Image (cartoon, rainbow, N blue to C red):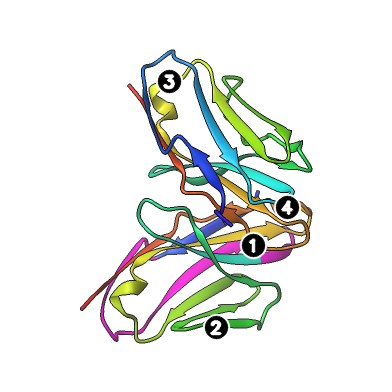
Amino acid sequence: DAGVIQSPRHEVTEMGQEVTLRCKPISGHNSLFWYRQTMMRGLELLIYFNNNVPIDDSGMPEDRFSAKMPNASFSTLKIQPSEPRDSAVYFCATRLAGDNEQFFGPGTRLTVL
Amino acid sequence: EDQVTQSPEALRLQEGESSSLNCSYTVSGLRGLFWYRQDPGKGPEFLFTLYSAGEEKEKERLKATLTKKESFLHITAPKPEDSATYLCAVQATTDSWGKLQFGAGTQVVVTP
């Protein structure tokens, strides 16, 4: 298995632009989590899905952030419009129902100028 | 509100010099405490889950223990390849979906 796949790995954009981050979970995993990691705030949970349904989005910082999971093989995290303070590494993690272990992707490093 | 505090923030060890990392937590009820390892430029990698006070888990040179208020990660005779950031996280009993609250991590550097 290729593990959790995230794209792009690096994204540099200008303030005000729309950013879309993508995640392909491990086949068969039915829970998906989006995290953000910064030096100041550490690893923060933004939103998570179970069987493609959003369960808790209380960690999403603002309405500029949105996430979707249209099917079991794909999820997106969108920021519109982006701001410099959104610069961070964004991780996607997935889990098999009933298991404890979350498998993390390699992350997307986002820089907003 | 759930809180996870890790100490020290950073630890520099000589190869073979054993030490311990601390994770203090405050949670209404503990479903599980998790340890992850994160290498630079990579996502966290799962190490252990602990469920109840007194429980211990081991993996190579790492041993995790749990009390009612904290967990320790003991590194015995570390090697340079044990250099990484170690993250602790808790899951509350009120959550059944896998929602984790992470600490800030301890950065460990092991020199030859």
* Residue at which label 4 appears: A28
- Expressed as whole percent of the image width and height from the top left, the position of residue B38 reads 43, 59
- Expressed as whole percent of the image width and height from the top left, the position of residue A88 reads 42, 36
- Which one is in front, B73 or A111? A111
Judge whether B105 appears above or below B20 on screen: above
Residue shown at the point (46%, 19%) measured from the top left? A82
Which SS type dominates the magenta stretch? strand
Report the chain holding disc 2: B
- Which one is in front, A15 or B28? A15
The tag on residue A67 is: none
Residue type, label 2: Glu
- Magenta-colored span: B8-32
Q: Is residue B11 visible?
A: yes
Left or right: A108, with B65 as reference point = left
CA distance for labels 1 and 4:
14 Å
The answer to whether the residue labelled 3 contacts the one labelled 4, judged by CB atoms less than 8 Å apart, is: no
* Residue at which label 3 appears: A83
The answer to whether the residue labelled 1 contacts the one labelled 4, judged by CB atoms less than 8 Å apart, is: no
* Residue at which label 1 appears: A101
CA distance for labels 2 and 3:
43 Å
CA distance for labels 4 and 2:
28 Å
- Expressed as whole percent of the image width and height from the top left, the position of residue A4 reads 56, 49
Residue type, label 3: Glu
* Residue at which label 2 appears: B58
Q: Looking at the image, tell me whether mark 1 or mark 3 is earlier in sequence order.
A: 3
Residue shown at the point (46%, 44%) measured from the top left? A107
Name which quarter of the figure residue B108 lies in.
Answer: bottom left
